[in-house]
Amino acid sequence: MSYQPEDFLSPGSDNPWMLDAAANWIAETKGEPGVHNTGINLFVWAKENPEVAFAIIQTILELTADDEPLFIQAAAGPLESFLSRCPECFVECVGQVAHIDARLRRAMQHVWQCGMSNPRYELIQNLANERA
């Protein structure tokens, strides 16, 4: 499948389900009453359905962009896990998006190596420090 980086810049605004999934992650992370496990397993989806996982993560980053602590938590949580587990073929797509998305590059600055290979982590760090 051929991906277009523009497809991942603001995916939630076009898809109510993704917007809802991202909002649920935020509410769950904030510990809001009445919100519990929403059944969204980005950890598993990173490998099995990276397109959807990445689109939801991009939506989370969009919704948390003005809340620095929550934004950092999203970067060091779902984004970091995604980057550790997504298929190698999808890393190229993430890189293409990062070239045009300053918010994603900003989030990548808060990603730790976790389970990533050294070359993948070096790529993420290079993208994080890239200037548009």
Image (tube, rainbow, N blue to C red):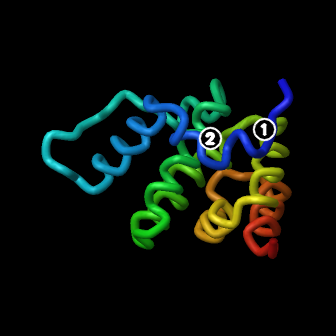
- Left or right placement of residue 74 versus residue 107 in this view: left
Q: In the orientation shown, which residue stands out farthest toward the front? A: 14
Which residue lies under the disc numbered 2? 54
Secondary structure category for the residue under label 2: helix
Given residues 10 and 26, the one toward you in this image is: 10
Given residues 8 and 84, the one toward you in this image is: 8
Q: Give the quarter of the figure containing the C terminus.
A: bottom right
Secondary structure category for the residue under label 1: helix
Question: Percent x, y for residue 38?
Answer: 32, 32
Question: Percent x, y for residue 89?
Answer: 84, 36
Question: Percent x, y for residue 93?
Answer: 80, 43
Q: Residues within 10 Å of mark 1 (few under 14, many from 20)?
A: some
Question: Percent x, y for residue 125?
Answer: 76, 68
Q: Give the quarter of the figure containing the N terminus.
A: top right
The residue sitting at 59% across, 69% down in the picture is 110
Q: Are marks 2 and 1 in contact (CB under 8 Å)?
A: yes
Which residue lies under the disc numbered 1? 90
Indicate the amino acid at tag 2.
Phe
> Is 15 located above or below residue 100 in the figure?
above
The residue sitting at 62% across, 35% down in the picture is 46
The residue sitting at 53% across, 61% down in the picture is 76
Q: Residues within 10 Å of mark 2 (few under 14, many from 20)?
A: many
The answer to which quarter of the image holds residue 36 is: top left
CA distance for labels 2 and 1: 10 Å
